[in-house]
């Protein structure tokens, strides 16, 4: 029976009816928090703003209503790759969905238009530019489309972190179709951004549904950045064979690190906006299709990635805001399983971002535009300060993120961050080392940057030091037992604490200030964070995610998933995500009815490849079970 044939116009659907559809198409037995409320808003024609964390199940909220109501709704999405992935996933579930964009072949376009013409399409995915055309307005009138879901809705706000001007024109939908209902969806939105979304989309008395921002399955850790390559290899060894995203601040760094990781034996590729479009697309598809494990990228690698089994997100440098950090780390563990989020932080990151923000504000002409840009720069600096505070070894990381987004966090110990796991080194008295550094600044005439000062303090035998006579200074070699990156770490901590001044510009130098002299005179104690970290511990959330799972069977199921995905030209996670495979390896079903009880197995996927998965499971019979965990 098609969805259209079961439609009931203007009907009120019960929760069991909603769950029946969810069970049939997605293989889920229950809804997550706020999903029922969001689905009802879609069924009852009320505007809504839905804020849920990445992996919180936003998509289901706009996918279910048109199935039940037997109508066609439109999803407005910012990226072709995102639309393609969603449509591929829905079709694999037997859901009638289509998209129209410039990358479609003529045959694909005809297939989509035919589905729409027959009245069989339930979700049509379009870009904001295509929605705001006479062609679409005529289509909407002909098919009486009156429900629109705006995905990644934070793109509409100047105060968001992925602002796209074309999103602000979506208010035209209300002008053209006054009776239309709009449903805005986003994973990251402060109160200010939420109000801006409501205003810009002209939502009428909307249901504002804000989920919990906390992601208990994510494990947050912040390390002092010292030898980045060695530190990366240490983390990647824990995640060998798993999906990892490494975020860098600059394009050059992505290419250097990707090459270095390939030399170390990892399947890695770079991704940044300066690459040719074809190369970017190839790198993303290789990552999506599990042909590589590690993507090293700038923030250009963002909303288009929908891979659900990313087990680690690494920031090689501090992001410029908590919003960016939450959105980017949110790409880990979308399947609900444990995932690690690592930030390699140096106080130098703050200075780098300050310089970039100030340059953007300074290089602007025309008075009104310049005023707006300076206002935006001040806002960006405030966001940067929040991110800097998060990176400090203060309170629980989960608590910090929750409270930043205006939600209390009641647990005393999250058990899933470096602070609560007691992995963070405590501040130590670094007054003596600080006096050595400040004395070196004095003795070199306050004319040099951090790198040269670190070389002097370490006692490096360089031509520049000899030429300047700095090998004869009393501070030469005072910290010879410390690596240069550790000395730099101390220098930038002094700058970060206002105990040393760093001049702006492309070639900054270090100068003393009043606080510096207080330290030199012994009037002030300096507390520094040691450039080391305690050993990481295995967390309860990681252990629980493998409980009862036959690990060898799980790996065999993964190989079958990859095989089927390649046959069908789909990303492996579209076939089944890791949560489903682990549940299979835990339950070990032997019949189609039993397989249908596995989380994430719907009727269409059971019919399409249930026999092949059951055969792999049956092939394990009589063998000793694998270990319950890694």
Image (spheres, grey):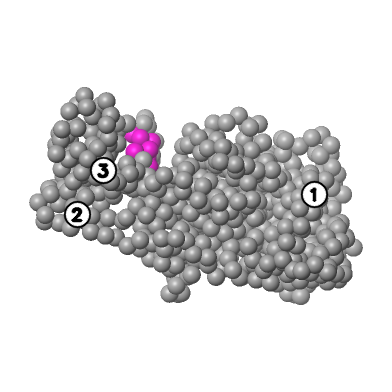
Depth check: 107 or 608 in front?
608
Q: Earlier in the sequence, mark 2 or mark 3?
A: 2
Image position, residue 244 (x, y; %): 58, 49
Residue at left offset 87%, top offset 49%: 118
Depth check: 73 or 350 in front?
350
Residue at left offset 56%, top offset 41%: 264
3D distance between C-alphas at marks 1 and 3 = 55 Å
Figure quadrant of the N terminus = bottom right
Residue at left offset 11%, top offset 54%: 522
The reply to whether discs 1 and 2 touch (Cβ–Cβ < 8 Å) is: no
Depth check: 107 or 587 in front?
587
| Quarter where residue 84 is shown | top right
Looking at the rendering, the stretch of residues picked out in magenta corresponds to: 353-362
Image position, residue 335 (x, y; %): 65, 60
Q: Earlier in the sequence, mark 1 or mark 2?
A: 2
In the rendering, which numbered label is found on residue 480?
Answer: 3
Figure quadrant of the C terminus = bottom right
| Quarter where residue 405 is shown | bottom left
Q: Is residue 593 magenta?
A: no
Label 2: which secondary element = helix
Depth check: 597 or 327 in front?
597
3D distance between C-alphas at marks 2 and 3 = 17 Å
List the residue tagged with mark 2: 431
List the residue tagged with mark 1: 563
């Amino acid at each position: 029976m098609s969805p259209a044939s079961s439609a009931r116009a203007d009907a009120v659907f019960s929760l069991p009816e909603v769950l029946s559809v969810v069970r049939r198409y997605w293989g889920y037995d229950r809804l997550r928090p706020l999903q029922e409320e969001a689905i009802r808003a879609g069924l009852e024609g009320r505007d809504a703003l839905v804020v849920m964390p990445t992996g919180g199940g936003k998509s289901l909220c706009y996918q279910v209503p048109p199935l039940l109501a037997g109508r066609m709704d439109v999803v407005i999405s910012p990226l072709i790759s995102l639309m393609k992935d969603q449509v591929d996933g829905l079709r694999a579930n037997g859901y009638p969905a289509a998209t129209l964009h410039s990358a479609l072949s003529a045959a694909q376009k005809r297939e989509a238009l035919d589905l729409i013409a027959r009245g069989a399409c339930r979700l049509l995915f379009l870009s904001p530019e295509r929605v705001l055309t006479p062609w679409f307005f005529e289509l909407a009138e002909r098919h009486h489309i009156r429900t629109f879901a705006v995905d990644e809705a934070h793109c509409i706000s100047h105060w968001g972190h992925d602002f796209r001007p074309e999103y602000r024109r979506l208010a035209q939908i209300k002008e053209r179709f006054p009776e239309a209902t709009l449903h805005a969806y986003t994973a990251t939105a402060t109160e200010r951004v939420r109000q801006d979304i409501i205003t810009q989309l002209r939502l009428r008395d909307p249901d504002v549904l804000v989920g919990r921002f906390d992601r208990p399955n994510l494990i947050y850790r912040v390390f002092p950045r010292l030898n980045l390559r060695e530190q990366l290899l240490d983390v990647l060894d824990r995640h060998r064979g798993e999906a990892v995203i490494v975020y860098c601040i600059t394009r050059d760094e992505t290419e250097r690190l990707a090459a270095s990781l390939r030399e170390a034996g990892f399947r890695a590729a770079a991704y940044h906006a300066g690459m040719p479009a074809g190369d970017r697309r190839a790198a993303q598809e290789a990552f999506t299709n599990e042909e590589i494990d590690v993507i090293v990228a700038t923030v250009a690698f963002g909303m288009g990635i929908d891979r659900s089994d990313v087990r680690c997100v690494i920031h090689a440098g501090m992001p410029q805001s908590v919003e960016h950090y939450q959105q980017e780390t949110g790409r880990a563990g979308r399947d609900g399983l444990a995932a690690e989020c690592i930030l390699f932080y140096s106080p130098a990151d703050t200075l780098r971002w300050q310089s970039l923000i100030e340059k953007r504000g300074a290089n602007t002409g025309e008075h009104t535009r310049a005023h707006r840009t300076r206002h935006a720069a001040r806002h960006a600096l405030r966001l940067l300060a929040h991110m800097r505070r998060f990176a400090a070894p203060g309170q629980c990381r989960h608590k910090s993120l929750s409270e930043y987004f205006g939600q209390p966090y009641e647990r005393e110990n999250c058990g899933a961050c470096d602070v609560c796991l007691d992995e963070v080194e405590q501040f130590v008295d670094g007054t003596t080392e600080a006096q050595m550094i400040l004395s070196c600044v004095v003795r070199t005439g306050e004319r040099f940057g951090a790198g040269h000062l670190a070389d002097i303090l370490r006692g490096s035998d360089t031509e520049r030091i000899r030429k300047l006579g700095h090998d004869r200074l009393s501070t030469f070699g005072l910290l010879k037992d410390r690596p240069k990156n550790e000395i730099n770490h101390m220098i930038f901590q002094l700058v970060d604490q206002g105990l040393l001044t760093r001049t702006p510009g492309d070639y900054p130098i270090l100068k003393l200030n009043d606080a510096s002299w207080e330290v030199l005179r012994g009037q002030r104690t300096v507390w520094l964070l040691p450039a080391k970290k305690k050993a990481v511990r295995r967390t309860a959330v990681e252990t629980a995610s493998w409980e009862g799972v036959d690990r060898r069977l799980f790996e065999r199921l993964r190989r079958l998933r990859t095989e089927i995905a390649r046959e069908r030209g789909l990303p492996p996670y579209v076939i089944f995500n890791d949560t489903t495979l682990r549940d299979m390896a835990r339950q070990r079903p032997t019949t189609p009815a039993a397989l249908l009880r596995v989380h994430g197995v719907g009727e269409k996927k059971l019919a399409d490849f249930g026999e092949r998965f059951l055969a792999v499971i049956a092939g394990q019979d009589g063998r000793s079970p694998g270990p319950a965990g890694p």
